Amino acid sequence: MTSFPNSPKLLKGGIVLIDPVTSAVKRIISLQYNPDTLSRTLQIKGVGADSSDRSEALRLKGPPTETIKLEVEIDATDQLEGGAGQSTQLGLHPQLAALETIVYPSYDQLQKNNALAGSGKLEIVPMETPLALFVWSKNRILPVRITDFSITEEAFDVALNPIRAKVSLSLRVLNVDDLNFNHKGGSLFMSYLQQKEQFAQRSTAGSFSSFGIGGIP
């Protein structure tokens, strides 16, 4: 049985990890199921609240801090019924590890820093991770940092491998205040902002009559 030829292709959201210097793609993590909801919070960086100068009331320090929250469901049931080798042996460990290792420094980085500390190095540079891009269609490709990460494992196989889980993610969008304009993440944010302004221009304009007034007095 085939699907309807005119049915739209279901796009998936996910996270792409790239090298922060070369922009080379290091890993693509596609969500198994798109979440039903996605919440976004904008914390405005205004000057007026921090200053008694009335001339500053309409000024902004920079782009707002945007936070994205979503809950991801992962289920190995279909793979287990089909007898997929990796799922029957490891359950969801590979899928969960692909997400979890985003917020871990690598094994090699930790070993290197430990060696530097053992040799008497006084100042050790904090370890840099790949740049994470949250991809939610071609209209939203955002540089992000995971700020909160929780996993609820809901079912297990006979070997206690997780086979159904929910992952809650809180992502902070990185903007040009976090990354300079020449950084790949900074340029992606500027493209996101420019696209947002283009969308705003295409929004249907309102009218004073809908407010019940003829204009601004």
Image (tube, grey):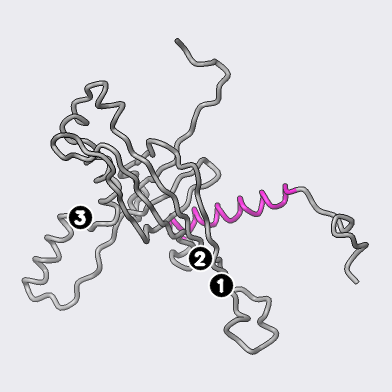
Q: In terms of sequence position, does the residue under pointer 2 or pointer 1 come before the other?
A: 1
CB under 8 Å between discs 3 and 2: no
Q: Residue at x 65, y 54 (%)?
A: 197
161 vs 217, nearest the viewer: 161
Is 90 placed above or below 64 here? above
Q: Residue at x 45, y 65 (%)?
A: 180
Q: Which residue is denoted by mark 3 in the rendering?
A: 106
- Across and down, in percent, residue 187 comes to 49, 56
Q: Which residue is denoted by mark 1 in the rendering?
A: 45
The magenta segment is: 182-203
Magenta-colored stretch includes residue 198? yes
SS for dot 1: loop
Magenta-colored stretch includes residue 211? no
Which amino acid, by three-letter code, is at mark 3? Ser
60 vs 176, nearest the viewer: 60
Q: In terms of sequence position, does the residue under pointer 3 or pointer 1 come before the other?
A: 1
Q: In terms of sequence position, does the residue under pointer 3 or pointer 2 come before the other?
A: 2
Nearer the observer, disc 3 or disc 2? 2
Q: Which residue is denoted by mark 2 in the rendering?
A: 65
CB under 8 Å between discs 2 and 1: yes
CB under 8 Å between discs 3 and 1: no
Left or right of 85 in this view: 30? right
Residue placed farthest to the bottom in the image? 52
Which amino acid, by three-letter code, is at mark 1? Lys
How many neighbours does mark 3 have within 10 angstroms: few (below 14), some (14-19), or many (20 or more)?
some
